[in-house]
Image: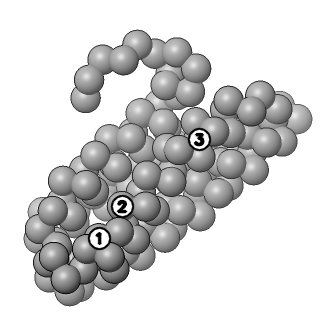
Amino acid sequence: MKDRGDKGFRKLNVWKRAHELTLLVYKHSESIPKREMFGLTSQIRRASASVPANIAEGYALGSSAQFLRHLRIAQGSLAEEEYFLILAFDLDYLSQDEYDEAESLRAEVGFLLSRLIKSVENKK
């Protein structure tokens, strides 16, 4: 990953890992058949990119309530992404190794996201 400096939302580990997951999803989804470009490929990429985007947006808004709201939206997008990974694997669009790599990172992001949500809730 390129060095952008760690300021604002970029210093959050959950954002960093979610961004890495998005890059991985883009890479692995290249092997999905072209007929799925406006279907599964688009869906899985949008769900994946929504996670770090919502973390960034919520962080930038400044209030705990807005941050929590966007973290929960990110959590929903992560669940959507989980399903799309399962679907891509079950359709044989992802290899076992690709699926395992993405799912492991997705689970880590989910854990970090839930911990951040609890932390922000406790500060309210």
| Mark 2 vs 3, N-terminal side | 2
Q: Disc 2 to disc 3, how far (Cα)?
A: 16 Å
Q: Is residue 118 visible?
A: no
From the image, tell me which residue sits under label 2: 45
Give the x, y percent position of residue 83. 41, 76
Do tag 1 and tag 2 residues touch (Cβ < 8 Å)? yes
The crowd level at tag 1 (other Cα within 10 Å; few <14, some 14-19, many 20+) is: many
**Which element type, helix, strand or loop, lies under badge 3?**
helix
Specify the farthest residue to the right: 124
From the image, tell me which residue sits under label 1: 41
Give the quadrant of the C terminus: top right
Q: What residue lies at 59% left-to-right and 57% top-to-bottom?
A: 75
| Mark 1 vs 3, N-terminal side | 1
Report the amino acid beneath label 2.
Arg
From the image, tell me which residue sits under label 3: 55
The crowd level at tag 2 (other Cα within 10 Å; few <14, some 14-19, many 20+) is: some
Q: Nearer the viewer, residue 34 or 122?
A: 34
Q: Disc 1 to disc 2, how far (Cα)?
A: 6 Å
Q: Quadrant of residue 87?
A: bottom left
User: Closer to the camera: disc 2 or disc 3?
Assistant: 2
Numbered badge on residue 23: none
Q: Is residue 5 visible?
A: yes
Report the amino acid beneath label 1.
Thr
Q: Is residue 78 above or below residue 83?
A: above
Q: Is residue 114 left or right of residue 38?
A: right
Q: What residue lies at 34% left-to-right and 49% top-to-bottom?
A: 22
Give the x, y percent position of residue 106. 39, 55
Q: Quadrant of residue 90?
A: bottom left
Give the quadrant of the N terminus: top left
User: Closer to the camera: disc 1 or disc 3?
Assistant: 1
Q: Quadrant of residue 65?
A: top right
